[in-house]
Image: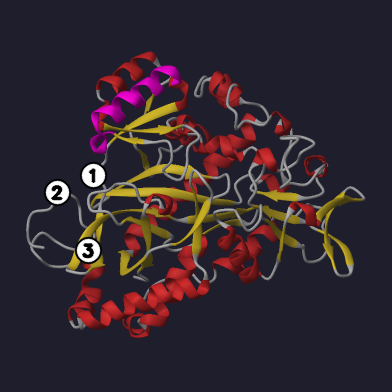
Amino acid sequence: MTSKRKHFDEMLLDSDGMRGPYAEYGRWFEQQDPARLIQKSQEAEAFFRRTGITFNVYGEDAAQERLIPFDLIPRIIANREWVKLSKGIEQRVRAINAFLHDIYHRQEILRAGIVPVDLIARNEAYLPQMIGVTPPGGIYTHIVGTDIVRTGENEFFVLEDNARTPSGVSYMLENRETMLQMFPELFSQIKVQPVSDYPKNLRRSLAHCAPAHCEGKPTVAILTPGIHNSAYFEHSFLADQMGVELVEGHDLRVVDGHIAMRTTQGYEVIDVLYRRVDDDYLDPLNFNPDSMLGVPGIMDVYRAGNITIANAPGTGISDDKAIYSYMPDIIEFYTGEKAILKNVETYRCSEPDSLKYVLDNLSDLVVKEVHGSGGYGMLVGPAANKKELADFADKLRARPNNYIAQPTLSLSTVPIFADKGLAPRHVDLRPFALMSPKGMDITAGGLTRVALKDGSLVVNSSQGGGTKDTWVLED
């Protein structure tokens, strides 16, 4: 791998050496027998299969359960880099929380003309049922996953915000556990910041968000849509790790103005519900009347202040990719500071001039649905053929408000362990932040997702991506 690389490689230098954060790991790696590493890679796959670390992919016929691919070359981040990233993440999450409180109360950012009124008023993720409602402790964004990409030595960009129901933290934890089991000697040689305290921190953070009238130790539970959900493994994993109940909608009911779960001793009141059910399915009396996944009347209990729902209903509007384009202004409006982490340049297709530019340059851009996730419904212009470009142009003209476009970034690469040695693949990073009235906790590292196809920029597991362990060095 001595040829000049087009992309910034986080591990390997063009001069055939290792970058600073990888120096110690590189010395260890060069002493390894490739046959042993191949065996370890196979062991990791067997471990994931045995543990049931899977996700569901929804196809035309039915959901398919797949094993999430894991690569044994870690992604290593220097402590100084992490300090900057974590400060930027904290600033961003606090600004999003302030923005959510504002748009459901005084709407000062709309009065100031910073964010267009129409972008809120006509947004399907904006919940009128939340107007005037203040969650316990004023926290909307209890758990946030911030997707970050890198393009150079000191160049980091936020690709998108995930404040609705961010997923992937179970893979972060299992990736570390797998590496610890396979290569214990590595962790005695290299001082890596731990991630294993995330479940304990999550439970503590959620407990700090309990309603004011809660006495004693708050009762926390996780609400799952059920075993057919793509992230069910994570729901059950976190419930087990936190030592809390995993419940479905039919396990819950309103009892004396509170939400209670069915137990062998009768119904027990829940103080904090970490829900992994989307807003529309949360309460059939307030939202989708056909929902079988939620709890009838839970929004009335919530508005009365008798339960904490994490994340708060209505947070999904901050995930909107058109709102994302205003994030630098949103951060400055609420914090008085410039954004520490930069946004990717974004064209709002709802604006005629931007739409014209996007249509004229479609083959060079990445186009995404404003409410899209999981890599679905997007176009990667440079990888599309003429018919795909023409079809997508028709979609843009038909529903321009539904799309934003961004330049195709030269994402950094980290090598994967391939049959013929190391091979560079593009990566992103999803760190996880926990917010409560008592402060913020950001786990050192996060989930690194890797595009396993050569040249691909799509890292989502549903689109053929895999994961890596993410190491943040202690010094």
Q: Is residue 199 magenta?
A: no
Q: CA distance from mark 3 to mark 2?
A: 14 Å
* First to last magenta residue range: 381-399
Counting residues from the N terminus, which is met first, the one under dot 1 or under dot 2?
2
**Three-letter residue code for mark 1:** Ser
Q: Quadrant of residue 226?
A: bottom right
Q: Residue at x 43, y 27 (%)?
A: 403
Q: Nearer the viewer, residue 320 or 463?
A: 463
Q: Is residue 419 left or right of residue 214?
A: left
Q: From this viewpoint, is residue 141 visible?
A: yes
| Residue position for label 2 | 6
Q: Is residue 394 magenta?
A: yes
| Residue position for label 1 | 410
Tag 3 secondary structure: loop
| Residue position for label 3 | 11
Seen in the picture, residue 97 relative to 124 is either above or below; the reply is: below
Counting residues from the N terminus, which is met first, the one under dot 3 or under dot 1?
3
Q: CA distance from mark 1 to mark 2?
A: 8 Å
